[in-house]
Image: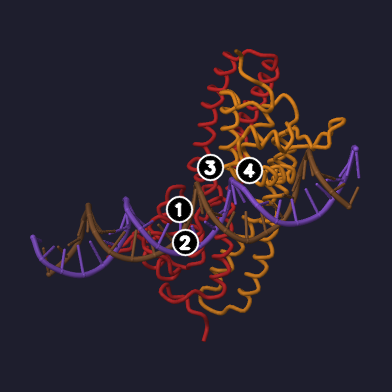
Chain colours: A orange, B red, C purple, D brown
Amino acid sequence: MSPETEPLSALGDLEREVIEMFVRMADVLNLPRSVGEIYGLLFVSPMPLCLDDCRIRLNISKGSTSQGLKILRSFGAIRTTYLPDDRKDYYLEETSLRKIASGFASEQIQPHVHNGKEHIARVRELLAQHDGADKAMLQEKIDLLANWQKRAGQTLPLILKLIGS
Amino acid sequence: MSPETEPLSALGDLEREVIEMFVRMADVLNLPRSVGEIYGLLFVSPMPLCLDDCRIRLNISKGSTSQGLKILRSFGAIRTTYLPDDRKDYYLEETSLRKIASGFASEQIQPHVHNGKEHIARVRELLAQHDGADKAMLQEKIDLLANWQKRAGQTLPLILKLIGS
DNA sequence: CATGATGTTCACAATTTATTGAACAAACGG
DNA sequence: CCGTTTGTTCAATAAATTGTGAACATCATG
């Protein structure tokens, strides 16, 4: 009569709706759809789930499930729990937005920012060698670019502070 | 001898390097590569460029160029200038990070956030109809989700303030 | 009008990214 | 050791995204 809640049953309307929200978030964050699905499922689930629970309920492949769980672990969006007398890994969603955002920032965004710094250094070298009427203008532009870079780098940690606990 | 600076010549090392930075930024922001290329070219260029200048120097198609300029206009990353005695549109990069970020936020991010609100309302409806032992837990989870949504919505404008002028 | 210059659109092609599933560890218990 | 359970990896495939270029609109000018 009432909708199923066991991990191996099909998804109910409410679960599907919540999962869809996370699929959209995944899209905004440029993560594979399956990552959103898995996190969403764990989020609505009242109990920790193992790889096969996720795979079966979401009807996705073993490979995608394994990859998706790995990505979610990589920025701390999920945690592992060990159930007694069970060899399988069970997963639990992290519910602290700050922790997730922080993990995401340091794993998926910082690398780009860091890389950007090296790039600017390289551009500055090239500018030193450069001769021409436009040199002054280029100097200004590159300073502006470095300034953007700096502000972006400062803003990230600030956002995390603002997001609070 | 010294590198070319005329709009119709091939790209110099410095230009290529700067453009590559913007291509990477485009990637982070989930925009097509060509959009990054076009903005980068306008950014390093000492003078406004028209569609054909961009197309030829970047060696991309007319279609991509037209689309890319449209996207950049859509969130105010570039502006149009009119040169006397010339029917063509010339484009100039916007150099205010605040303006660009603000345009990007309202054009590319807000829609998702807005959509999210409707979604939560729908989930709440479904929860009202829902019976089961897990109802209390789901209520908490959905409240948490709504809270995230709210904080994300508040954080966006705050970021823009922090980015300053 | 006819012409040429400028810019947009859109079906198709090329490219990139995600998913699948089978082969491969690893580890446990008999 | 062997078979079973669990999870990972990766080459092949499928799906989604981006780029192309030709056809089309627009408009200023003679």
Query: Can residue B26 be seen at all in this image of the molecule?
Result: no
Q: Name the residue beneath numbered marker 4.
A: A61
Q: Earlier in the sequence, mark 3 or mark 2?
A: 2
Look at discs 4 and 1 and give the one toward the viewer. 4
**Circle 1 residue:** B72
Q: CA distance from mark 3 to mark 1?
A: 13 Å
Residue at x-position 62% and y-position 38%: A36
For the residues labelled 4 and 1, the Cα–Cα distance comes to 38 Å
Q: Label 4 marks which chain's residue?
A: A
State the mark number for residue A99: none
A107 relative position to A131: left or right: right
Number of the label disc, if any, that sits on residue B105: 3
Q: Position of residue A96 (x, y in %)?
A: 74, 32
Q: Which residue is mark 2?
A: B38
Can you say whether A70 is above or below B15 in the image? above
Spatial separation of the CA atoms under disc 4 and disc 2:
39 Å
Q: Amino acid at mark 3?
A: Ala
Where residue A93 appears, as percent x and y from the top left, is 73, 33
